[in-house]
Amino acid sequence: MSGEEEQRREASAPGPATVEDLAARLTGLPDREIAALLLARPDLLSPPSPSFTALAARAAGRTSTDLALAQLDAAAIAVAEGLVGPVAGLAGPAGAVDDLAAILADCLSLPLDTVTDRLSQLSRLALTISNRPAPGLAEALAPGTASWPPPAESLTGPSPDSLTIIEPRAIAAESAQRAEEAVRLVTALLREWSREPGPLLRAGGVGVRPLARTAEALGLAPAQAATVIEIAAAAGLLGLDDDGAAWLPAAPALAWLSHDDAPPLPERWAALAAAWASSARAPWLVGSRGEDGALRAVLGDAAEAPWARTLRHRVLRLLAALPDGASATPGFVRATLTAARPRRPIPDGAITAILAEAELLGITGAGALSRAGRALAERESLDAEADPASLGPLEDALAADLPEPVPMLLVQSDLTAIVPGRPVAALAALLERSAVVESRGGALTLRFTPDSVRGALDAGLSATELLDALGAYSPAPLPGALEALVEDAARRHGAIRVRPIASILRVPDPAAAAGLLAEPRLAGLGLDEAAPGIITATASAGQVLRELRAAGLAPVLEDGQGRLVIDGAPGGAAGARGRGAAPEPTRPGHVIASRRRAPASRELAVMVGRMRAGQEALDAAGPAVAASDPVHALAVLRQGQANRSLLRLRLAGPDGEVQDRRVRVRSVEPGRVRLADVARETELTVAVHRIVSVEPLSRD
């Protein structure tokens, strides 16, 4: 096409569509297509529009248009930008659709089918009318707001690299190991906070020091500990105490704390994975500063992002769409999601953090989606409130990848031990209480220490019971070194008894009591001798236990009646603190987990029927009917500004009387409009809420 022909065609082509054009098109559509539009643009559902003219005014508004554009991929955005700018002269009845699609495909280096599909999508979303941009689209994608055509690689996103395909056995092994470790870490968190809860800051959340203490107990960095805490809370395993002053294990967590009756590993993991996928929490923000300059605390309101849930869903579905075994890097995921939704920006660091969370949970292994992760991504609903029975496929998928457990423990004379594989549940629970893990992998390597043996004694085992339990899994007699270690630990165990009042230490040995009072490392406990053998402490019972053990002592916990409290027993620590039963789950933040319910077909039919009836009544009233609802009035004002039309404006004056004016629109701004009164030859600025009605009078 020559330059002169192109100029003539652009000059004769119609401009952007008007609200009236959009209303006329909507009126001509069948009810099912109107219903599909409302489902595709849910912001138009509420409040219901009284007519198609009002619906058109809302759909053409900038806010609604921006929400619709946020759903489009880069190819659709590029096609829309072309219709608004460089190829606008080819749109409308003057140009054939096939010719327009061919020109766009050539300019954008996209397949013709892709461009044709995107043109149809823009039309279905009421963003174009006969390939002419609707008013809101012309405003949102005004020429000059972006370079066109964009680079070809930005329209399709990167392709996965087939050098990144991981062997299925490697994915299964790594993901199963991480899933098992995630369950162990959450259980360890519950035990730690049953001994010493996470105190609540005045501003909300748990502070830096308790987080550091918890991270040390779990053997993690604070950032990873924050992730474990947030996942546990999302799964309903944490709650606030009766005073609302501290986080501790909630009632559903009591089963996790049982050494003998804990739910199976796949069941516990499925609950964590489903809760993570539906969570709006953003643990990676913990430790950073918010807009007010305050540090974001774990379990605090500021460590929340409403978009986090949606982003997790998008990442999961992207990983599920890749070939089996394909590993995805953060850069690939970010580039692909950006191409899919270029007008929905992804905050820095979010993709890397979400992929790290998925790896920690065993949803991925070696960067590729695991069998259980794929089952999670393919769930019909990722809502945490779904029926627990719907988690069955997740449990089955993880169980299929878990290696067969072995009931064998090989103990050596240097106090190390090896489990040649994954230990059976009873052996794993026993070793969790009595040994320190040195390495995990194809085999489990452990070491017995005085502190680890004390853990088994804290859990209620005697020296004989512990040795018998370990010996039941050993094919050879236990080494004498281990027997000596256990018996020595048992002799020292319970020499000091801590009774929480806040707190009291019973120390029958006068020499031991004097040593405690003189020990400088215990100065922070506020120790004081109330009577011979009785020492009071200003610190909590959990802190007293922890610091006495750090000083090389072996205290035990008593309840208010002097009975020994078994570590990890359901309700034991809560009862020792005098807090009564375990609390109900408390989920941090304020984002409601439930998703907006889409209206049923019958509801949509009723809604569309009312709009059609309202439009018929509006048409019967004639073209002079005025726009009275705010959305429609703003649309008429914007259209009047674009066409320089003369409008009749009915305005509520300061005295409450309605004024009648003939005006032209100078500008439409947020909450107000600037007008020129042609009769009085003055300018005025009017708040939108004062406008009673507006209607066009004539066009110049």
Image (spheres, rainbow, N blue to C red):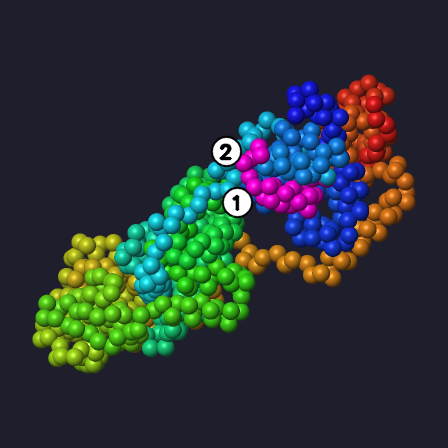
Instruction: Please name the residue that numbered disc 2 is placed on.
Output: 151
Q: Quadrant of the C terminus?
A: top right
Q: Which residue occupies 21% across, 70% down?
A: 420
Q: Is residue 248 left or right of residue 78?
A: left
Q: Which residue occupies 59% across, 44% down?
A: 114
Frontmost residue, 551 versus 270: 270
Q: Which kind of residue does numbered mark 2 sit on?
A: Pro
Disc 2: CA contacts within 10 A as few (<14), some (14-19) or many (>=20): few
Q: Is residue 276 left or right of residue 419?
A: right
Q: Where are the magenta residues, as a range?
A: 106-129
Q: Is residue 621 above or below residue 424?
A: above
Residue 49 among those drawn in magenta: no
Residue 340 is labelled as 1
Q: Is residue 562 above or below residue 446?
A: below
Q: Position of residue 478 (x, y in %)?
A: 13, 77
Q: Is residue 20 visible?
A: yes
Q: Is residue 76 above or below residue 500?
A: above
Q: Which kind of residue does numbered mark 1 sit on?
A: Ala
Q: Position of residue 134 (x, y in %)?
A: 70, 37
Q: Which residue occupies 71% across, 36% down?
A: 96
Q: Which residue occupies 51% across, 69% down?
A: 390
Contact (Cβ within 8 Å) of mark 2 with mark 1: no
Q: Is residue 397 left or right of residue 195?
A: right
Q: Is residue 685 visible?
A: no
SS of the residue under disc 2? loop
